[in-house]
Amino acid sequence: NMIQLAITGARRITEVREQPDEVDPPEGKTLDGLKHELLIDNVHFSYIPGKEILHGVTIKVDKGEMVALVGPTGSGKTTVMNLLNRFYDVDSGAITFDGVDVREFKLASLRQNVGIVLQDPQLFSGTIRDNIRFGDPDADQARVEAAAKQANIHDFIVSLPEGYDTFVSDEQSVFSAGQKQLMSIARTILTNPRLLILDEATSNVDTVTEAKIQAAMDNVIQGRTSFVIAHRLKTILNADKIVVLRDGNIIEEGSHEQLLAQNGFYAELYHNQMVFE
């Protein structure tokens, strides 16, 4: 309802205003991709002093690995994503790319290397073409189309009367949640990020669109180091590593098969979801 939307909007504006100013390190380094490993090393973090969200989280990721973060709402999955992109800094511990602390890189350089696909992506006022090449405004039509094809949205776009010149805005969008997500994936593919963060959003789409999103995500993950925040466990069965978070602690870690064999929290989550599939 409209009142609820207004309250949420006001809350978001307050959150943005209260964000600390982002400061580049004086001798900021340039991040040139990931050569060996990304390490989240004994990270503690709190949004509000005294209310710790992450309690000494350690995750080691080798170049090219896909890591899935699993856990209930409020377990710390989104916080890990925020810290990787330096929307916030850790309270203690460190996040390093090939041994270099993330705080030593220029922010712009860091974020050029990180691609994010959010669960509820925003479209901007402009054409579909502008939306897809948002991260690289100089991209030509061939690159825009190549990204859209990889994201399984090209056929839909060319079926529209105006094609890539179709005007969109988030307020009066005629696109479904699934179509927005595919456009967001195309936008990410175009920028060719070294590290990928996917907040999976296959929860509110039909089966056909879900399959398209899954295939598009597989395309974009290929050969890239990636973190997937997973809500439906069947989408991450092939992850190299699944990290299970609960209340800001890692309670289990391993491959899908290893975690099923442990017969713990993950196995219970998985079996519960399978009942409803």
Image: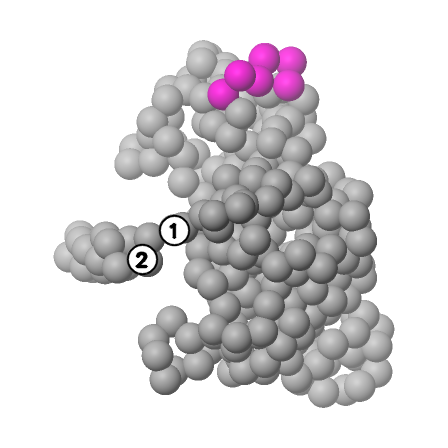
Instruction: Work out whether residue 125 or residue 226 is closer to the camera in this orientation and state it.
Output: 226
Residues rendered magenta in the picture: 137-143
Q: Is residue 202 above or below residue 137?
A: below
Q: Is residue 208 visible?
A: no
* Contact between labelled residues 2 and 1, with CB atoms less than 8 Å apart: yes
The disc placed on residue 19 is 2
Residue 8 in the image, given as x and y percentages of width and height: 24, 58
- Which residue type carries mark 2? Gln
Residue 272 in the image, given as x and y percentages of width and height: 64, 78
Q: Residue at label 1?
A: 22
- Looking at the rendered structure, the secondary structure element under dot 2 is loop
Q: Is residue 131 above or below residue 24?
A: above
Q: Is residue 85 visible?
A: yes
- What residue do we see at 44% from left, 81% from top? 52
Task: Looking at this view, name the residue that lies furthest to the left.
Answer: 3
The disc placed on residue 174 is none
Crowding at dot 1, Cα within 10 Å, few <14 / some 14-19 / many 20+, comes out as few
Q: Is residue 218 left or right of residue 93?
A: right
Q: CA distance from mark 1 to mark 2?
A: 8 Å
Residue 16 in the image, given as x and y percentages of width and height: 29, 53
- What residue do we see at 66% from left, 47% from top? 195
- What residue do we see at 45% from left, 21% from top? 130
